[in-house]
Image: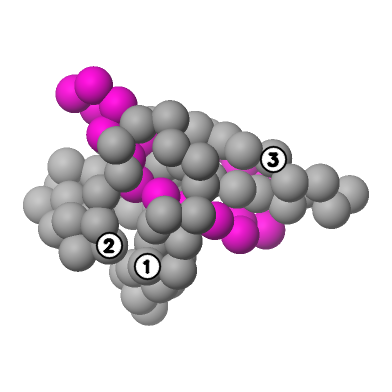
Amino acid sequence: MRRLLVVAALALAASSVPALAQCVSPAEARRAVSAGDAVPLSLALQQAGISGQVVRVALCRKGRRLVYQIGVLDRKGRLRQVVIPAN
């Protein structure tokens, strides 16, 4: 179920977040998570202490690193753009 949520979030908004890096396709994102090159989105959010409603997600390459670019609605309804490590 968790993997399905990660895949759905990545597929829903893979190109919706402004590019700070080169973002990968949803299929590449699934492969990266399956291969252990990227942690699942839920774990990355937990590790970073991100709370709020995730509305956009993209897995992107920034140099040699993978990062999640995330749009999060906070408790006051403001959209925050967050970049967190994916590995």
* Model colouring: one colour
Say whether residue 58 is magenta: yes
The reply, left or right, for residue 74 in relation to residue 19 is right
The answer to whether any part of residue 60 appears in the image is: yes
Q: Mark 2 and mark 1: span between their CA atoms?
A: 5 Å
Q: In the shown orientation, is residue 13 left or right of residue 26?
A: right
Which residue is most to the top?
63
Residue 16 image position (x, y, % from top left) = 50, 54
Left or right, 47 with respect to 49, comes to: left
Q: Position of 33 compared to 52: left or right?
A: left
Task: Give the label on residue 26, or none.
Answer: 2
Residue 8, image x and y in percent?
A: 40, 72
The range drawn in magenta is: 49-67
Label 2 vs label 3: CA separation?
Answer: 22 Å
Check residue 14 for magenta coloring: no
Image point 23% across, 21% down: which residue? 63
Q: Are marks 2 and 3 in contact (CB under 8 Å)?
A: no
Residue underneath mark 1: 11
Residue for point 17% across, 42% down: 37
Mark 1 and mark 3: Cα distance apart in space? 20 Å
Q: What amino acid type should be assigned to the residue bearing mark 1? A: Ala
Residue 49 position (above or below residue 63): below
x and y, in percent, of residue 44 in the image: 43, 43
- Residue 78 lies, with reference to residue 54, above or below; the image says above
State the predominant SS element of the stretch in magenta. Answer: strand
* Label pair 1/3, CB-CB below 8 angstroms: no
Tag 2 near tag 1, CB within 8 Å: yes
- Label 1 Cα neighbours within 10 Å, binned few <14 / some 14-19 / many ≥20: some
Residue 23, quarter of picture? top left
Query: For the residue labelled by badge 3, is the local secondary structure a helix, a strand or a loop?
Result: strand
The three-letter code of the residue at mark 3 reads Arg
Q: Which residue is mark 3?
A: 80
